[in-house]
Image: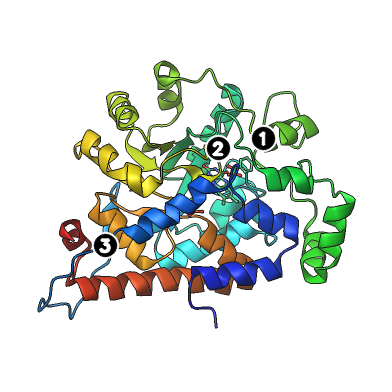
Amino acid sequence: MLLNAEDFRCQARRALPRFVFDYIDGAADDGACRQRNQADFAALTLLPRVLRDTSQIDTTVTVFGSPWSVPFGVAPTGLNGLIRPGGDALLAAAAARAGIPFALSTASNMPLEAVRAAAPEGLQWMQLYVMHREMAERIVQRARRAGYQALVLTVDVPVSGNRELDLRNGFRMPFKPTPQIAWEALTHPRWSLRMARSGTPDFANLTVAGEDAGSASLQAALMARAMDRSLVWETLGWLRKSWPGPLLLKGLLHPEDARLAVEHGIDGLIVSNHGGRQLDAAPSAIHALPAVVASVQGRIPVFMDSGVRRGSDIAKAIALGAKAVFLGRPLLYGLAAQGAAGIDAVMKQFSDELVRTMILLGASRIADLSAA
Ligand SMILES: Cc1cc2nc3c(=O)[nH]c(=O)nc-3n(C[C@H](O)[C@H](O)[C@H](O)COP(=O)(O)O)c2cc1C
Ligand SMILES: O=C(O)C(=O)c1ccccc1
């Protein structure tokens, strides 16, 4: 029986070739930050109230004018097509069914227009990595035309985190199976068959004038996470010109950076350490959240991700000032274990756990959690 995120993780380990599972599950250096993310959630408590009317539970929140049925969304993750062909479309459609937003990664294997078409009624946000500004501008224009509602600039990948599992496995883009990867793939005939039918899982959203979107050098550069490190607060205004909608920064932890973000006209923040995949010495996101919330003083919504594994973790993040959270690996485990049904099941698990937590806390609305 798959009852919780850890159950789905174990099932995903069985369902995937090792190099794919390692890529998803892996973290930077020694995995200390990834562990901290969960340990710090576990160390927090919520103080329940009793004899309050919880006969009706309302989990909805409104974000940038749009209602979410529950206060969580799908975090942007690259290479979802490596888990299942069309992984991004499956995640986007599941999010639309659940009434929550899906964030598409710049490092996705499906063209952003195709993902939008897979769930045209859903909320979709576009995550941006800036390798070249001109390439970034093209992605932003396309996202705007395709109807993405918000743009999320990820700022915690100035360079790749040290992912030793990926290095040892020889996992590279353009996708080129090493003997080990070929062996792992072949011992998972179902996975290999699916991939054989769908073709190589290239990054599909890299467009540069004069260079083929699928060029080997662009593929390799994105996999090496070779970002434009000259992009700074002073040059952020450049993005504003091509994106009139909500613009969020993802991956900051410092309260002073939160203040700078507000000063520079940013519309929302995602407090995150990238699931422990970047700076292994970083504090947990839930630990960093309160100072960021204090610094922002309610001027813009603050979201968080990294380490959310239970509905009670969502309640804890909201109690500490988050508007909502994003889920990364748990949904990927669901996708790996059972495809679309697995994503639905993981989303339902988090919703059910949140509702139970709210009843136990005597909170009938999300706003009531702020006091827990
Ligand atoms: C396999 C994988 C790929 C990811 N790719 C991206 C990405 O392309 N862009 C991005 O902003 N964050 C990326 N992230 C980070 C997630 O958006 C999110 O911050 C993180 O997964 C949250 O932690 P959690 O997995 O503990 O929930 C990735 C995370 C994983 C696990
Ligand atoms: O692995 C990641 O966390 C990530 O952000 C990423 C970046 C570029 C390509 C693939 C994944």
Query: What's the distance in space between the residues labelled 1 and 2, CA to CA?
Result: 19 Å
Percent coordinates x, y for residue 347 in the rendering: 45, 68
Q: Which residue is more in the foreground, 69 or 141?
A: 69
Residue 361: percent from left, percent from top: 20, 71
**Amino acid under disc 3:** Thr
The x and y percentages for residue 108 are 63, 47
The tag earlier along the polypeptide, 3 or 2, is 3
For the N terminus, the image quarter is bottom right
User: Where is mark 1, residue-wise?
Assistant: 222
Q: Is mark 2 within 8 Å of ligand 1?
A: no
Q: Which residue is drawn at 45% across and 26% down?
A: 239
Colour pattern of the rendering: rainbow
Tell me which residue sits at (33%, 39%) in the image: 268
Find numbered disc 3 in the image and state the secondary structure of the residue it sits on. Answer: loop
Q: Residue at label 2?
A: 142
Of 276 and 239, the residue lying toward us = 276
Q: In this view, does 65 lie to the left or right of 98?
A: left
Report the amino acid beneath label 1: Leu
**Vertical comparison of 359 with 218: above or below:** below
What kind of element bears circle 1? helix
Question: Could you tell me if residue 69 is visible in this image?
Answer: no
Q: Could one spot residue 39 in this view of the protein?
A: yes
Say whether disc 1 or disc 2 marks the residue closer to the N-terminus: 2
Q: Distance between the residues labelled 3 and 1?
A: 40 Å
Residue that carries the numbered disc 3 in the rendered image: 45
**Contact? badges 3 and 2 (CB < 8 Å):** no
Residue at horizontal 74%, vertical 55%?
19
